[in-house]
Amino acid sequence: MKPGIAATMGAWSARHRKTAVFGWLLFVVLATFLGGAHGSTKVTDAESMPGQVARAAKILDEAGIKSPAGETVLVQSAALTADDPAFRQVVEQTATAVAATGKAADLRSPYETGAVSADRHSALLQFTVAGADREQAVAAVTSVVDAVAKVQAQHRELTVEEFGEASAGKWFQDQFTDDFARAEWTAVPLALGILLIAFGAVVAAVLPVVLAVTAFIAAGGLVALSSGLLHTSDDAGSVMLLVGLAVGVDYCLFYLRREREERAAGRDAATALRVAAATSGRAVLVSGVTVVVAMAGMFLTGIADFQAMSYATIVVVVTAVLGSLTVLPALLSLLGDRVEKGRLPLLHRLRGAGSDRAGGRVWNALLTPVLNRPLTATLLAGGLLLALAAPLLTLHTANLTFQQQVPRGNPLVATSQRIEAAFPGSPAPATVVVKARDIASPEMTAALADLRAKALASGRMHGPIDLQLHREANIAVLDIPLAGSGNDATSAAALKTLRDDVVATTVLKVPGTEAPVAGSTAGSYDFNRRMSDAMIPVFGFVVAFAFLLMLMSFRSLGIALTAVVLNLLSVGAAYGVLSLVFQHGVGASLFGTAGVGAVESWVPLFLFVILFGLSMDYHVFVVSRIKEAHDRGLSTRAAVSYGIRSTAGVVTSAAVIMVGVFAVFGTLSMQSMKQMGVGLAVAVLLDATVIRAVLLPASMTLLGERNWFLPRWLHWLPRLEHGEPAAEPAPDRPAVLV
């Protein structure tokens, strides 16, 4: 049989060590330099959201109208009312301070707009932050925030606080930078520490981390370099670090552990490396292809943010696979047994005495009853996963508001809550963008007035309704506050009334007019609708491809079906935990958060494609070893026993690394990153324990020889089997311990 792609690449790298190593270094340097020189082109507002929200943004972009970043300053007093001279003086002083910064525009006094609370103890000073776009507004808002803070310091008997799009954007920008740096500085040492325990030697532990980090750096440059064609985003960078570090380390770990295992069995260096390339290298290749195609399913959503995250993940996974199959064999060939340099005596002895002999006592104790009573084990483990998945039935997704995204106790959240309490209704109004043939015509003027009147008369919207006319572009922009919190059923009903009744029966009656409704509530509604529409195509695409890949890789209908079912169980359990913790708040304090009533809209779909790809790491690696043993003539039960036990150490190490890296993201400040980190960590933990240690061996034992059945009518499928004959087990390690 001809050697496979992974074996061929490994053999070439071992023969051309310097070319492979220096070629990799040159690739990383060039990708980083060119990406930095090119810079990153970010996803625009018109691209980031679907539906009417995207259309509204496109209308404004084409007309050259920039949506200003709205800000408000709350002036509030428990004792004084807005009519008292002292209260009015503070409002005027605040307005003067804001105007003096030179960064504010369209400054509107509450005494002009009527933005005074019903009890007269609160007033809102409204303005926009100067800037050609949101990024410039975010950069400019600091001086305004400082000016407001100085007024507050002079009048501590009153509350003088600022909140708005620019100040919230500034917090997100600063927090994202801090969180990203913290994730880098925490995840990398954590992975290194776990690898030190796994290998007990410094060089062996450092290699996977160095390769994973260089793969991430190179991938970042490639993503930036190509961002002119496919725009990127800040979330894409976070996801690329999260996935890149996890899979990069795991791929190298699989390869390195197999090579060390073969050397410990007494084989010469060349043979050990060849076997590792043909077995673990193949598992890395299959796993990488699965992740890439699973992530490609995200393009079916048609949402630019998803496409950016998907593309970044694909690039970093391909880069990690390339490094694992080329530079790692070259380095192992170059180092030889010196890869064990820097041994840490205590860790090395503990590693050698524990898991490396027949799977370790813990795995022996766990696996023996599973193989003896496979039906009971299947029912118990399956029941546990189904129980964890049960809260999925109540899962509610939404575009989380600022108050939901940031940690409790945040000063900006407290300010927004005070504003909402004093001025009930959605803090972020719906924005109606009206594009007409002649925005100043009598017919359109009457329609705009009718729209405002009907909105107020509906009882689901309230004032003040702000109207801005752009006569030269024949566009009108109306900001209409909705009832509710902005992310609840009340706001959703108000949005539906605005779109289907108010707008449809007023401005849309004028021929040649379009009037998409945007805003945060509309964005959440349109996004969820697009997610619902995309769910079946994406799920179907990913599941079908994973099934087909397993079918071609193992030439077995049973293994392909088992892989899909087990992956669906682990994903379902992760969804259930997300709903339980982040939606209902059960155990939320353990993760440093609280129930926010919803899961971020993009998280479930993104988790599905990521987990379906990543779970193949363990599945392909473990089942490949089982198939090796079966191909040597062992019975299915004996092959399962040998395969599970012989991979126990590396699967445990790989899972701990992935769970550790994902858990780091579970500690970050933003709710969406926290949900993604916790969801991934829980799913991988379940996958490496309940699935791989119980359900997989139990189900394969129940199927017996039917595991290897492939109907004749499928024999035409391409073969993706091992190109290297499986190595015999070492004589000092029994293959079967049942």
Image (cartoon, rainbow, N blue to C red):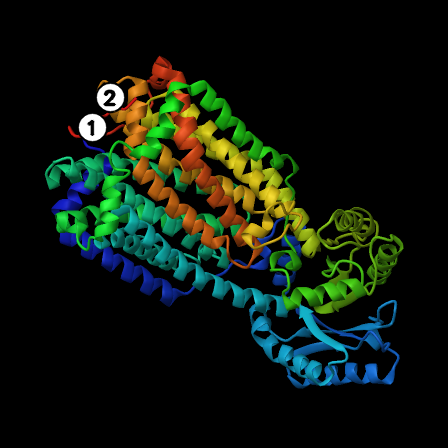
Q: Amino acid at mark 2?
A: Asp
Q: Residue at x 35, y 40 (%)?
A: 652
Q: Nearer the viewer, residue 473 or 735?
A: 735
Question: On the image, which quarter does residue 61 sit in?
Answer: bottom right
x and y, in percent, of residue 93 in the image: 75, 85
Q: Residue at x 39, y 32 (%)?
A: 692
Question: On the image, which quarter does residue 282 sit in?
Answer: top left
Q: Are marks 2 and 1 in contact (CB under 8 Å)?
A: yes
Q: Nearer the viewer, residue 49 or 524?
A: 524
Q: Is residue 514 left or right of residue 386?
A: right
Disc 2, SS? helix
Q: Which residue is mark 2?
A: 631
**Label whose residue precedes the other's in the sequence (2 or 1):** 2
Question: The C terminus appears in which quarter of the rendering?
Answer: top left
Q: Nearer the viewer, residue 453 or 463?
A: 463
Q: Amino acid at mark 1?
A: Ala
Question: On the image, which quarter does residue 428 sit in?
Answer: bottom right
- Check residue 726 in the rendering and tell me which mark sits there, or answer none: 1
Q: Residue furthest top?
A: 712
Look at the picture and state if 160 lies above or below 164: below
Disc 1, SS? loop
Look at the picture and state if 267 lies above or below 479: above
